[in-house]
Image (spheres, helix red, strand yellow):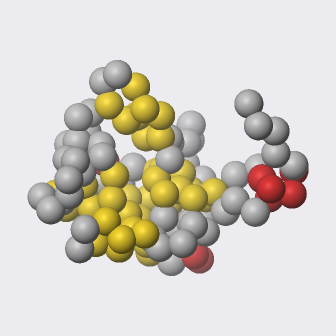
Amino acid sequence: MDLIEWKDFEKILMVTGTIIKIEKFPEARKPAYKIWVDFGHYGKLKTSAQLVKLYQPEDLIHKQIIGIINFPEKQIGPFHSQFLLTGFETEDGIVITTVERPVPNGTKIT
């Protein structure tokens, strides 16, 4: 395990946001959704996530998630991903990271 310094952790902008729109992503090499999230004062950003094994779009809409929003934009096929939706890879599929109770969109993890 590589240890990091506190200053490295402070560089990560990990914040809450609410999923506002989901579309299927048939052009993706692995089954995925296109997901748009409202991050409050950070704005609305989009990403692609391989969540189709465990979630239907109606399960995710309005769900509050945790995203890392200061990675460089990444092109996934014809789509530009603007943040990383955090989650945990399991044998059954990716389980998204959520909050235990609602907090304002854009709240930074501490």
Judging depth in this view, the residue of 94 and 5 nearest the camera is: 5
Image spot of residue 102 (x, y percent): 55, 48
Q: In which quarter of the image is residue 93?
A: top left
Image spot of residue 71 (x, y percent): 57, 67
Please give the name of the residue rendered at 87% of the width and 50% of the height, measured from the top-left corner.
6
- Count of number-bearing discs: 0
Viewport quadrant of the N terminus = top right
Along the horizontal axis of the image, is 15 left or right of 23? right
Relative vertical location of residue 38 with respect to residue 5 in this rendering, above or below:
below
Judging depth in this view, the residue of 28 and 19 nearest the camera is: 28
Please give the name of the residue rendered at 67% of the width and 62% of the height, measured from the top-left corner.
13
Q: Say if residue 1 shows up in the picture.
A: yes
Q: Say if residue 36 shows up in the picture.
A: no
Relative vertical location of residue 106 with respect to residue 62 in this rendering, above or below:
below
Q: Residue furthest right?
A: 6
Please give the name of the residue rendered at 20% of the width and 57% of the height, measured from the top-left corner.
28
Q: Residue furthest front?
A: 2
Along the horizontal axis of the image, is 65 left or right of 41? left
Image spot of residue 19 (x, y percent): 38, 59
Relative vertical location of residue 41 with respect to residue 86 in this rendering, above or below:
below
Along the horizontal axis of the image, is 32 left or right of 3? left
Q: Which residue lies furthest to the left in this view?
A: 26
Please give the name of the residue rendered at 26% of the width and 33% of the height, measured from the top-left corner.
54
Image spot of residue 95 (x, y percent): 40, 34
